[in-house]
Image (cartoon, helix red, strand yellow):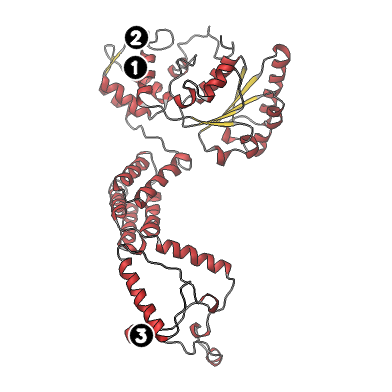
Amino acid sequence: MYADDLFDDPDRALQGRPLADRMRPATLQEYMGQEHLLGEGKALRRAIETGRLHSMIFWGPPGTGKTTLARLLAGRSGYAFETLSAVLAGVKDIRAAVDKARQIRAQSGKGTVLFIDEVHRFNKSQQDAFLPHVEDGTLLFVGATTENPSFELNNALLSRARVYVLKSLQRDAIEALLNRALNDTERGLGELKLKISDTAMQLLADAADGDARRAINLLEIAADLATDGRIDDEAVGEVVAGQVRRFDKGGEAFYDQISALHKSVRGSSPDGALYWLCRMLDGGCDALYIARRVVRMASEDIGNADPRGLELALNAWQVQERLGSPEGELAIAQAVAYLACAAKSNAVYSAFNEAMAAAKQSGSLEVPIHLRNAPTRLMKELGYGKAYRYAHDEPGAYAAGETYLPDELAARRFYHPVDRGLEIKIGEKLDQLRALDEKAGKSPSDG
C-alpha cells in the first residue's frame, strides 16, 4: 500500500484537474523511462524496494518524472510526503516543514520525505538550513533540479545526498504514455473513445521532446479539437505549431549544445556542426550569440591554417546583424560548414595563451632600448631607438639577427605553425628567417 498522502484526496473530482495531473503514475509499474535507475537490480530500485532510502538529488530536464518519482519512493517506503517549491518558499517554510516532520514522527513514528522542487533556486543560507535536520534524521531530503548540481548546490548539501541523473523520455515511452492516457477510463480520456492516427501520434511524441508532461498537455488540447471522435493530423499540426526543442539559455542544455557545435567544427564534422547549429536556432538561441562564437572558433581552431575562415565568420555575423533571419542564419551555416571543412590549427591560440602567461609571470620587463620610440631630442640623447635596423632597408626586408623580445625572454618562442593549410608556408618562411639569423650569428636558441 502507498501512504495516504501520496496523492491528492482520491474522492476529489477528477474532471477539473489537468490530464497530466490525473495521469500521474501511482505505482512503479506505471512509471515510464529511467530504466538506468529503476531497472531490475539498479541501486535506486533496490533502495525503494527495501525501504532503505537516503537523501538524494534528482537532476534532469523538465517532464522526466522527478516529482512523481519522489512521491512513489515515499509512498512505497511508508514515509510521509511534504513538498516545497524553492521558487516560492523561504527559510520560514523550511522550519514549518521541519516542525511538521517532527510532529509526524512523534505521533506515528513515520519518517518524512521533504521534496524540494527547483532546489537550485535556493541560496546558500536556505540550502544550509536543511543540513542539521538531514543529519539528525528528521528529514529525508529529496531535491529536484534541471541545473547541474555541481554548479548550483552547496558542497555540504551534495555530500549528504546522492545525485541521480534522469534522462529525457524516448519516443516509445512517450507514445506509451499517450496511449495510456487515451485508453484510461478512470483518469484519462478513455470514456471519449478517441481514435488517433499513427502520424498524429508521432507528431505529438516528437513535439513533446522527451517531456512527459508536455506530451500529455498537448494530447489534452488535441482531444478538445477532435472531430467525430478522431484526433487527426490537422488538429495535431495546429496544436504542435510553434513548439520548440528544449533549450534553456544560460542553463545546462545551452552550454552543452554550444560545446557540441564548437567541438564538431574542431573535429571537422560539417554534419555535426550544422545539426547543433540548427538545434540551437530551433530552440530559440540568439543567432548573434552563435555568430560571435563562430568567430571565436575561426581564430581558436582554424587560425592561420586558413585565415579566410575568420573573414567568412565575420561576414556571416555582419549578414545576421544587417538582414536578420533567415538570411543571416544561412550565412552562419555557410561559415560553420566552411570552418568544419577547413584545415585546423590552434597554433595562434596556443601562442597567445603562452605569451599571455609569460607577460603575466615575467613582470614589467623593459622594452629593449633599440625598440623604443624616440620622438624627442632627450630620448635620442639617451639612446632610445639607437641601433634599430629598419627592416625595409635590409635585404629581403628582414633584419637578420635582430631581436624583438626583452633580453630576459630572448630565447622564447611562442608561435609554432602546424603542418596544415597555409601554416605550412608560414612555417617554411619562419625556418628560412631563422636560418638567416643563425648565419648572422645572433640567433637565439629555441625555447
Give the vertical position of 299 relative to 373 (above or below): above
Give the vertical position of 39 relative to 396 (above or below): above
- Seen in the image, is 297 located left or right of residue 355? left
- Seen in the image, is 155 located left or right of residue 62? right
Q: Secondary structure at mark 1?
A: helix
Rendered location of residue 349, percent (x, y): 43, 61
Residue ID at (41%, 43%): 257
Residue ID at (48%, 62%): 353
Q: Nearer the viewer, mark 3 or mark 2?
A: 3
Q: Which residue is mark 2?
A: 192
Residue ID at (42%, 30%): 168
What's the CA distance linking mark 1 and mark 3?
80 Å
User: Please, what is the three-letter code of the amino acid marked with disc 1?
Assistant: Ala
Query: Of the residues under marks 1 and 3, which one precedes in the sequence?
Result: 1
* Crowd around label 2: few <14 · some 14–19 · many ≥20 (10 Å): some
* Crowd around label 1: few <14 · some 14–19 · many ≥20 (10 Å): many
Q: Which residue is mark 3?
A: 392
| Dots 2, 1 in contact, CB < 8 A | yes
Q: Which residue is mark 1?
A: 223
Rendered location of residue 174, percent (x, y): 38, 23
- Seen in the image, is 16 located left or right of residue 54? left
* Quadrant holding the N terminus: top right
What's the CA distance linking mark 3 and mark 2?
88 Å
* Crowd around label 3: few <14 · some 14–19 · many ≥20 (10 Å): few
User: Please, what is the three-letter code of the amino acid marked with disc 2?
Assistant: Leu
